[in-house]
Amino acid sequence: MKCLMFEEIGKLSPSTIADPTSPVWIRVEATGICGTDLKSVYVGHRYFQPPTVLGHEFYGQIEKAPEGYPLKKGTWVVAAPYYECGKCATCKAGKGDLCADKKYVEAGSFAEFVGVPLDYLDGLFVLPEKKDSKDYDVYALTEPLACVINGTSRLETIKGYSKVLIVGGGPMGALFGLYYNSKGIDCAIVEPNAERAARLRSWGISTVSQEDVKKGEYDNIVIAVNISALVSQYLPLVRQGGTLLVFSGLPKGEMLQIDAGAVHYSEVSIKGCSGFALEHFKEAFETIKANERSFRQLITNKFSFEHGQEAFDMLKAGKAFKILLGSTL
Ligand SMILES: [Zn+2]
Ligand SMILES: [Zn+2]
């Protein structure tokens, strides 16, 4: 089958690999490029060493399934790239995102097909009826939104009281903005790049400049940029009793400098999160279903695997927002 191969650091090329070996195949219609994919290609990632096929934000149609399988060939689905076992002590405690015994799809989605195990049905979500397959594109955002919803589940937000500040207006920051807008929670994003900030505002997301963020104005602050100094900088600004969420990945072993008074006297909590649990994926799916038009705006470009390198280079240069790839585009 066709794929976009991550050949070596900085280099991707259209290629072919062996077909999936799992009993159920999904034909990938489109698949999003995520910050993790970008980091893997240009910086390197310990879990995703080249040569390999990346990608995990995808939707498509059931291509192949054994007789008696509940989903027929041609059914449109979005798949969670993994989900928790649901049986271990961690899962029973409601912390599925931390389960050490997750199930996974067979391989990366920058490919024509992705295989899934027979017992993977809880991770597949049937898309609503559409006339045009392009109208399904927005569902490629389900996985990144699931990660964002995992983040929002750490924050207490009270309508009429809460104000959420998102530091960083990349695709994840924008998803936070659209999510809170859909819930009627006051929210603003700090994004120093003027062009990006204007784009966020055109989607109905409020922006604020860093200098205008007043101490105590926001009870929840989300760090959606992978710069640890921002944690130290924003912690003292959180309203008393509020929370600072370390959302973007920071290097293991890196030490954070924090204002002790903010944590003790102002009762500010620091929380972190990574990935998602199945309940977050479900909520992301429902949220997108109810707000398709709003979320679709984030997808700025679509490319075939032949133009995969160009797509990655564009993202690296900050010239696109969310890009989808597909073998048939
Ligand atoms: Zn992702
Ligand atoms: Zn588990």
Image (tube, grey):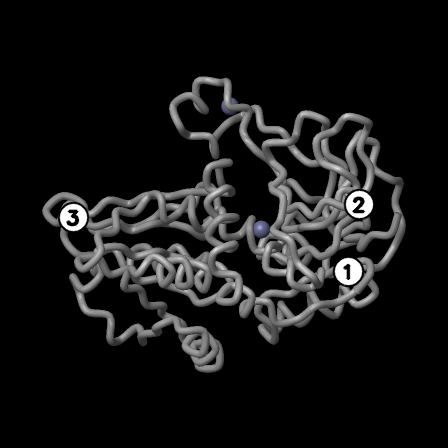
Query: Could you tell me residue 66's position as x and y percent?
Result: 81, 28
Q: Nearer the viewer, mark 3 or mark 1?
A: 3
In the foreground, 3 or 149: 149
Q: In the structure shown, which secondary structural element does the residue marked by tag 3 occupy?
A: strand
Disc 2 target residue: 113
In the foreground, 283 or 98: 283
Query: Could you tell me residue 252's position as x and y percent?
Result: 47, 42
Label 3 vs 2, first from the N-terminus = 2
Note whether 294 is above or below 245 in the view shown.
below
Q: Say which residue appears at 87% left-offset and 52% top-offset.
A: 2
Q: Quadrant of residue 167?
A: bottom left
Label 3 vs 1, first from the N-terminus = 1
Q: In the structure shown, which secondary structural element does the residue marked by tag 2 occupy?
A: strand
Q: CA distance from mark 2 to mark 1?
A: 22 Å
Q: Amino acid at mark 1?
A: Lys
Q: Amino acid at mark 2?
A: Phe
Q: Say which residue appears at 37% left-offset and 57% top-offset.
A: 223
Please report contact status of discs 3 and 2: CB closer than 8 Å, yes or no.
no
Q: Amino acid at mark 3?
A: Gly
Q: Quadrant of residue 150?
A: top left
Q: Is mark 2 within 8 Å of ligand 1?
A: no
| Res. 241 mark | 3
- State left or right for residue 244 relative to residue 281: left
Q: Say which residue appears at 58% left-offset and 28% top-offset.
A: 102
Q: CA distance from mark 3 to mark 2?
A: 48 Å
Q: In the structure shown, which secondary structural element does the residue marked by tag 1 occupy?
A: strand
Query: Could you tell me residue 214's position as x and y percent?
Result: 19, 69
Q: Is residue 229 visible?
A: no
Disc 1 target residue: 11
Query: Could you tell me residue 43's position as x and y percent?
Result: 63, 56
